[in-house]
């Protein structure tokens, strides 16, 4: 499966692959694509999101294979993977399955644990909401639970931006993705085997994957660094892009310097 990819920056630069959250598309990374012009930035759309057609059913495993195949097609053997939420699940499984393809990881507002029973039941209810009432009925409650409360008052354009991305998704893709998220593997045991530089970022007000989830990953990934992004919920790349971009750019610059010294 070849994914649609937004590519920007310098073609000869170090590849940085942005993996979007559920139920977003590569469009959510616009502030980061603009900030990382010195790198080769690739932002794919997952199946049924953005400009990639839906091929279903699918699991997280299939999304990982889609990303690897797409990058291979573009001549990218190794990259830095930046994943938010669902994109983080894809990045984690990719790192376990194909560690030789990972130069570094940036895990944003995600977790390594699989869904428990309560979370599975909530995803089943969300599927019924989307099936019965459509994406518009799903988008607003989802964003109310995902974003920091102050985002609605200080950054209404960010809220509208994210809502607009959700409404472009395929209803079937959203329902299938919810099933894939509920069925994903527990990746906690894999974290201790990671040997690549890892940055962990999380919004201070994230209720979906709270900072405690990031602290768990930080404790298990040797040498990882963790930063809490203030005034942000589940999407700090949009809610507080200034601080998010500073932390990510600093991590990438340090990575280039370290590898240049070898």
Image: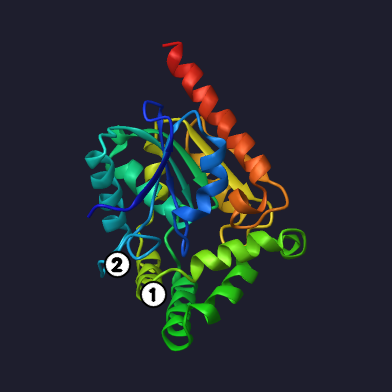
| Near-viewer residue (150 or 120) | 150
Quarter of the image with the N terminus is bottom left
Secondary structure of residue under mark 1 = helix
| Near-viewer residue (202 or 120) | 202
Mark 2 closeness class: few <14, some 14–19, many ≥20 residues within 10 Å: some
| Near-viewer residue (166 or 8) | 8
Q: Is residue 134 visible?
A: yes
Q: Is residue 48 above or below residue 61?
A: below
Quickly name the residue at label 1: 175
The residue depicted at 28 percent of the width and 56 percent of the height is: 61
Residue 216: x %, y % from top left: 54, 47
Q: Residue furthest bottom?
A: 132
For the image, the number of numbered tags is 2
The residue depicted at 73 percent of the width and 64 percent of the height is: 149
Q: Is residue 77 above or below residue 62?
A: above
| Near-viewer residue (121 or 32) | 32
Secondary structure of residue under mark 2 = loop
Question: 106 left or right of 160?
Answer: left
Q: Is residue 147 visible?
A: no
Residue 79: x %, y % from top left: 37, 34
The residue depicted at 37 percent of the width and 44 percent of the height is: 190
Q: Which mark is residue 81?
A: none
Quarter of the image with the C terminus is top left
Question: 161 left or right of 116?
Answer: right
Q: Which mark is residue 54?
A: 2
Question: 126 left or right of 193?
Answer: right
Q: Nearer the viewer, mark 1 or mark 2?
A: 2
Q: Is residue 175 above or below residue 109?
A: below
Residue 65: x %, y % from top left: 25, 51
């Amino acid at each position: 499966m070849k994914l649609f990819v937004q590519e920007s920056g310098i073609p000869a630069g170090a590849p940085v692959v942005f993996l979007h959250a559920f139920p977003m598309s590569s469009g959510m990374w616009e502030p980061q694509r603009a900030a990382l012009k010195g790198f080769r930035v690739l932002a794919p759309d997952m199946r049924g999101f953005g400009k990639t057609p839906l091929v279903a059913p699918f699991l997280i495993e299939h999304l990982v294979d889609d990303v690897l195949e797409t990058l291979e097609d573009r001549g990218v053997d190794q990259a830095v993977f930046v994943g938010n939420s669902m994109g983080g699940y894809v990045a984690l499984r990719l790192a376990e399955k194909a560690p030789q393809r990972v130069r570094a990881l940036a895990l944003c507002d995600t977790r390594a644990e699989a869904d428990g029973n309560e979370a599975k039941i909530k995803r089943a209810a969300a599927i019924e909401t989307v099936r019965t009432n459509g994406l518009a009925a799903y988008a607003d409650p989802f964003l109310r639970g995902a974003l920091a409360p102050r985002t609605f008052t200080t950054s209404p354009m960010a809220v509208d931006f994210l809502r607009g991305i959700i409404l472009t998704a395929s209803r079937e893709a959203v329902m299938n993705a919810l099933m894939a998220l509920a069925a994903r593997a527990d990746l906690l045991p894999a974290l201790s085997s990671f040997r690549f530089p890892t940055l962990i970022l999380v919004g201070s007000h994230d209720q979906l994957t709270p900072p405690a989830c990031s602290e768990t990953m930080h404790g298990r990934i040797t040498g990882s660094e963790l930063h809490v992004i203030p005034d942000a919920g589940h999407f700090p790349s949009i809610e507080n892009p200034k601080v998010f971009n500073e932390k990510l750019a600093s991590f990438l610059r340090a990575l280039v310097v370290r590898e240049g010294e070898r």
